[in-house]
Amino acid sequence: MPQLRVALNQIDSRVGDIAGNAETVLRRTHDAAQRGAHLVAFPEMMLTGYPVEDLALRSSFVDASRSALVELAKRLAEEGLGELPVVVGYLGRSENARPRYGQPAGAPQNCAAVLHRGEVALRFAKHHLPNYGVFDEFRYFVPGDTMPVIRVRGVDVALAICEDLWQDGGRVPAARAAGAGLLLSVNASPYERDKDDTRLELVRKRAREAGCTLAYLAMVGGQDELVFDGDTIVVDRDGEVIARAPQFAEETVLLDLDLPAAPDGAPSGEVADGLEIRHVTLSAEPVAAYRAEHTGGEAERLSDDAEVYGALVTGLRAYVEKNGFRSVLIGLSGGIDSALVAAIACDAIGAGNVHGVSMPSAYSSDHSKGDAAELARRTGLNFRTVSIAPMFDAYMASLSLTGLAEENLQSRLRGVTLMGISNQEGHIVLAPGNKSELAVGYSTLYGDSVGAYGPIKDVYKTTVFRLARWRNADAAARGETPPIPENSISKPPSAELRPGQVDTDSLPDYDVLDRVLELYVDRDQGREAIIAAGFDPELVTRILKLTDTAEYKRRQYPPGTKISAKGFGKDRRLPITNAWREGS
């Protein structure tokens, strides 16, 4: 059987940085060539980054992507890499689509190309366009209608893009019909909890359907609220894993594969789902037999908590670095939420770039102030104390607020303090709110909701506690100081805006609250279905009402890392003005 050494580049890219992304492709291709690769591949929309959203509708951006692709092909040849085929994703345009109502202007496409000998040897566009969850690809793209196959060193390699694997039909059965020896799919599949298990089973199933070895090349990194966890997978035709890359880490998977020889002649004609084979022979002769040095292996899998924590670190690091920031600012209350956010920030960008501020009021307990200082000592972050008591007294003398207004004033003074320091010193503020609080509106607009990014925005309170315990245990296992004070984990959660206040004064127990919210928010179940699951009807009605009426607050909350199947933001889009109430 012919041999083929493939280099699968599980790497990050930056949306809009076409020149920088092209340089990365060039550099990585040089590395792959030095390591003897016969075929090099990069993720979905590598040149433009992913997702580009409405940039896809801007002709100047599409043209820049297409021009960069042609220039990249020339540069590869000029630097002695012309004989090495390179598969790279980019933003393209259909040359055949006619303008029509309901189609994105300019007929942009989510494309990939094969670069060879200084030319764009083959272009193709994603066939299946996802239009669910965070995806709006029907808004941005028109679908491709070909089955691309390249012959490399005597092996026919079929090509696909991400959703082409997730949906039945299309390019997977077409690859079988074309007689491909390898199906290579380039992807930018966002992270969700437990998605790695789903992904593995999908890849195994599609390899068996395609009847050939399947290489699933994934992206890593972060873009706004999305995180890409890598987890590149290669399986044989029976679905057995040959290689699996680590999560949340850039890596080039170099792999020697024994693959079936391409048939005599080139496949042609229509195959499954009306796709027409587009076959290009790049090199017909197999490579001379060599001793395989890269035979695969699986990276150690992360535990569920380690995986979620890794996603949160990756998301925050990407947001800070890709937007050109250097440091972050966090209001440290001594509570569990700000403590976890601080630990994530220290792991993401280094404790020297993390600034914490304790902002006590007359109601702040000594242990909370002490817990904030202890967190700073344990992590090494920069720490200061700014009392809001004088500001609070001045406002109260003018406004004479009472009750909830008085409580929220304290939170808003902390927000003003953080934003003032941010403006003065150049740090971005991190909002510490969790998904449970955001769901029921247990946050103060222009108070604890201020900030540029919310690292735990999509993390329920019960998971916040679990992640804090996991992070401490992980540190202890490595002989390091656990970053989060035990008291921050064990004490009852409280906003400390009035004497003796605890969260359960206003909210149900978090364990119950989170289970109801998961059914309502994440799974879109209605009131009756949630009650049928065993929850008290009065409690369910109360939680759902709190959630529905807090929509206007969530719209004003900063972006934050998505880890669930349905986070607040791109996933869950409900009208603010909305008279519908479950069970009414």
Image (cartoon, rainbow, N blue to C red):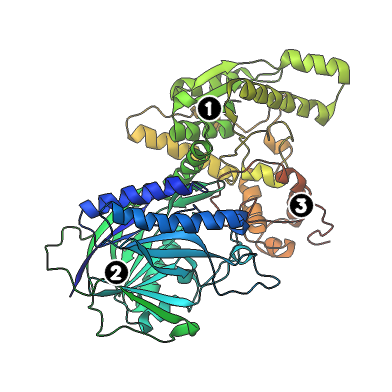
Viewer-proximal residue, 195 or 171? Answer: 171
Look at the numbered discs 3 and 2 and tell me whether their residues touch, using CB distance below 8 Å. no
Say which label, 3 or 2, has the lower sequence index: 2
Residue receiving disc 2: 240
Of labels 1 and 3, the one closer to you: 3
- Distance, label 3 to label 2, CA atoms, is 46 Å
Residue at the farthest bottom position = 269
Query: Element under label 1?
Result: helix
Say which label, 1 or 3, has the lower sequence index: 1
The correct choice, above or below, for 199 with respect to 447 in the image is: below
Query: Element under label 2?
Result: loop
Q: Amino acid at mark 1?
A: Asn
Q: Amino acid at mark 3?
A: Asp
Query: Label 3 neighbourhood size at 10 Å, few (<14), some (14-19), many (20+)?
Result: many
Residue receiving disc 1: 487
Of labels 2 and 1, the one closer to you: 2
Residue receiving disc 3: 548
Of labels 3 and 2, the one closer to you: 2
Q: Amino acid at mark 2?
A: Glu
